[in-house]
Image (cartoon, grey):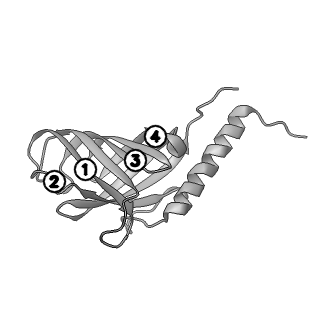
Amino acid sequence: MERINRAQLLKASIAAAVTATVLSLGIVHAQSDKPVASPWAMTVDVTLDPSAAAPTTGPFYTSGMVQRSGAAAGAAPMGFYRSWGWRFDPTRTMGGSVATSSFEILGQGEIVVSGLQDERGTITGGTGNFRAVGGQADMVATGPNSFRVTFDITSHRNVGSN
């Protein structure tokens, strides 16, 4: 009989939790011309708060609602978005910034994206069902105050010990 250690069991349970979460949220890819590298891809739409000021160079904080990709207008949010950092080129499509963004998915956990966020960012980790994940987040503007994000989760780091 094969023995399975705690680390292997933990890794398998994290993979199962992320897969179940992604399947329950729906899968749609933001950029059809870019292949998804993972079976755990998840796409959401973000609508920024109406009070968001026009992008300028310098420090910024912005927030908004996270909804299922393609949800009807007025649908209940499935989470919240917060981002803070330094915008260096507001003329770029996604604002040309170095930032940390938090995508809170209610009842599931949080996905954190950091680094250069100019159409693509690095998933640096998360909480809850998204703890110890890595990958990238592809971002596409869908309007002046909205964008679509595809989380391409490609790795699960070992969060436990034997």
Residue tagged 3: 104
Amino acid type, label 1: Asp
Q: Please indicate whether residue 137 sits to the left or right of residue 107 in the image.
A: left
Residue tagged 1: 118
User: Nearer the N terminus, badge 2 or badge 4?
Assistant: 2
User: Which picture quadrant has residue 20?
Assistant: bottom right
User: Nearer the N terminus, badge 3 or badge 1?
Assistant: 3
Marks 3 and 4, how far apart at CA: 9 Å
Q: Please indicate whether residue 42 sits to the left or right of residue 88 in the image.
A: right
Residue 92's tag is 2
User: Nearer the N terminus, badge 3 or badge 4?
Assistant: 3
Amino acid type, label 2: Arg
Amino acid type, label 3: Glu
Marks 3 and 2, how far apart at CA: 25 Å
Secondary element under disc 4, as helix, strand or loop, is strand
- Within-10-Å neighbours for mark 2: few <14, some 14–19, many 20+: few
